[in-house]
C-alpha cells in the first residue's frame, strides 16, 4: 500500500477534543483511529475513573461491550466527562441474546446503562455466541441501524466463513470487523484482511501491543527499537516501542483499540496520531520479524 494511499484515507475532523485522526467507514461515517477499551484490564471492573481520565486526556472513541459487565460505569464516565454526546464515539458489542429477548432488547438495556440515545457503533462480539443463527442476528442488527439506535454496525472476531454467512442475506455490509491484530498474528490474519478489503469492511485492531506487553523478547523487539530511534530523531521527541506498534497499525489504516491504567500512556497513544509515519521499508521489517512467530492471546479457536 503506498504512503499516498494511506495518507489519503486518514483524515482529520474538526472534533473539539484532541483525538482527531479518523478513518472512513463504508457507511459514510468516520471512526476515530484511537479507541480506549473497557475490556481486558477493566473487564468486570468499574471503568468510570479510567474512562474519565481517557476522555480528559483527549480520547473520543470508547470501546465497551455487554459482556464486559461495566457498561454502567462507562455511562457514568460519559455523563461525568461533561462532553457533548456528539464529540464522543461510543461502541458496544452484543453478547449472547438471553432466552425470550431480542437483540433490540439487549441494545436498549445497553443504551440505558451507557446513558446515551444511540451508539456510534454496535458490533456482534463473536460469531461463536450465535452459531446457526448468525444471519438472522445480523438482520436484527441491521434493523437497529435503520431505527437509529446504532449509527454504524459491524462485527468482531469474524472469520471469512462468518462474514460469508451473513453477507449472503445481508442488506448492509458490516462497517467493521474488530479483531486481534498485531505482528504476531499477521501471517494468520492475511487472508481475512484481504477478504475484508475486497468487501470494504474496515479491520480494527485490539491487542495491538501484544508483542511488547505480553510476549517481550520476541523477534520483533530489536526491529521496534531501531525504528523507535529513527522516529524519535525525525520527530525530535522520544518515541517508544509501543508507539511504533501503533504507527504500524496507522500505516495500514487500521484503528487501534488499546487501554491503559496510566494517564501518561494514554497521552503517548494520543501522541502517536501526530508522529511521523513509518516508511514502507519499516513496515516491511516489522512484517518480516513478526511473521517469524505466532502468538494469539484472545479467541484461540480462530486458529483451529
Ligand atoms: N472484540 C474482542 O473480542 C476484544 C478482545 C480483547 C480486547 N478488546 C478491546 O480492546 C481493548 C484493548 O485491548 P488490549 O488490552 O488487549 O490492548 P493492548 O493495546 O494490546 O494492550 C493494552 C495493555 O498493554 C499494557 N501496556 C501498554 N504498553 C505497555 C508496555 N510498554 N509494556 C507493558 N505493558 C504495556 C497496558 O497496561 P498499563 O495499564 O500498564 O498501561 C494495557 O493494559 C480492550 O479493553 C477491549 O475494549 C476487544
Image (cartoon, rainbow, N blue to C red):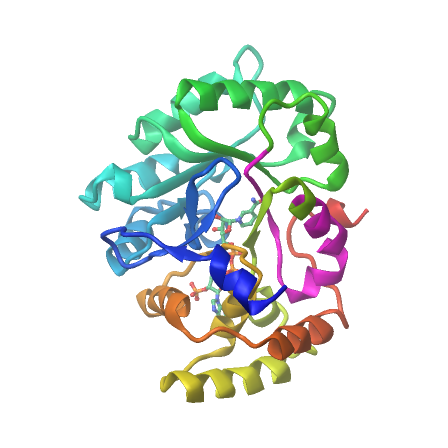
Which of the image's four quarters has the N terminus? bottom right
Q: Is residue 127 magenta?
A: no
Q: Nearer the viewer, residue 300 or 82?
A: 82
Q: Main secondary structure of the magenta part?
A: helix
Find residue 133 and report its horizontal and vertical position in percent.
69, 20
Q: Is residue 226 above or below residue 245?
A: below
Q: Is residue 139 above or below residue 242?
A: above
Q: Is residue 98 above or below residue 270?
A: above
Rendering quarter of residue 138: top right
Q: Is residue 75 left or right of residue 202?
A: left
Q: Nearer the viewer, residue 273 or 137?
A: 273
Find residue 96 and report its horizontal and vertical position in percent.
58, 26
Rendering quarter of residue 190: bottom right
Q: Nearer the viewer, residue 197 or 270?
A: 197
Residue plotted at (43% across, 80% down): 239
Residue plotted at (38% across, 61% down): 261
Q: Is residue 246 left or right of residue 12?
A: right
Farthest residue, direction top: 100
Count of marks placed on residues: 0
The magenta segment is: 174-196
Q: Is residue 205 left or right of residue 19?
A: right
Find residue 237 and report its horizontal and vertical position in percent.
36, 84
Find residue 214 and report its horizontal and vertical position in percent.
59, 66
Farthest residue, direction left: 82
Q: Is residue 181 magenta?
A: yes
Amino acid at each position: 500500500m503506498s504512503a499516498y494511499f494511506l495518507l489519503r484515507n486518514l483524515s482529520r475532523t474538526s472534533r473539539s477534543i484532541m483525538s482527531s485522526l479518523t478513518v472512513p467507514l463504508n457507511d459514510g461515517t468516520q471512526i476515530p483511529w484511537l479507541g480506549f477499551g473497557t475490556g481486558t484490564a477493566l473487564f468486570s471492573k468499574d471503568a468510570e475513573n479510567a474512562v474519565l481520565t481517557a476522555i480528559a486526556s483527549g480520547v473520543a472513541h470508547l470501546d465497551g461491550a455487554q459482556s464486559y459487565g461495566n457498561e454502567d460505569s462507562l455511562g457514568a464516565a460519559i455523563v461525568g466527562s461533561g462532553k457533548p454526546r456528539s464529540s464522543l464515539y461510543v461502541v458496544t458489542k452484543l453478547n449472547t441474546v438471553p432466552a425470550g429477548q431480542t437483540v433490540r432488547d439487549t441494545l436498549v438495556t445497553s443504551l440505558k446503562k451507557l446513558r446515551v440515545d444511540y451508539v456510534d457503533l454496535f458490533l456482534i462480539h463473536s460469531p461463536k455466541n450465535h452459531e446457526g443463527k448468525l444471519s438472522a442476528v445480523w438482520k436484527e442488527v441491521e434493523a437497529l441501524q435503520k431505527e437509529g439506535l446504532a449509527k454504524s454496525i459491524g462485527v468482531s472476531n469474524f472469520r471469512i466463513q462468518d462474514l460469508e454467512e451473513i453477507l449472503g442475506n445481508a442488506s448492509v455490509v458490516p462497517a467493521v470487523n474488530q479483531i486481534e491484530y498485531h505482528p504476531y498474528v499477521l501471517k494468520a490474519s492475511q487472508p481475512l484482511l484481504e477478504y475484508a478489503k475486497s468487501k470494504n469492511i474496515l479491520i480494527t485492531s485490539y491487542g495491538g501491543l501484544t508483542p511488547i506487553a505480553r510476549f517481550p523478547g520476541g523477534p520483533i523487539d530489536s526491529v521496534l527499537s531501531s525504528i523507535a530511534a529513527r522516529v524519535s530523531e525525525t520527530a525530535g521527541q522520544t518515541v517508544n516501542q509501543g508507539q511504533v506498534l501503533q504507527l504500524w497499525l496507522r500505516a495500514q489504516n487500521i484503528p487501534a483499540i488499546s487501554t491503559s491504567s496510566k494517564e501518561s500512556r494514554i497521552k503517548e497513544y494520543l501522541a502517536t496520531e501526530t508522529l511521523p509515519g513509518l516508511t514502507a521499508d519499516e513496515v516491511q521489517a516489522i512484517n518480516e520479524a513478526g511473521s517469524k512467530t505466532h502468538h494469539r492471546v484472545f479467541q484461540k479457536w480462530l486458529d483451529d
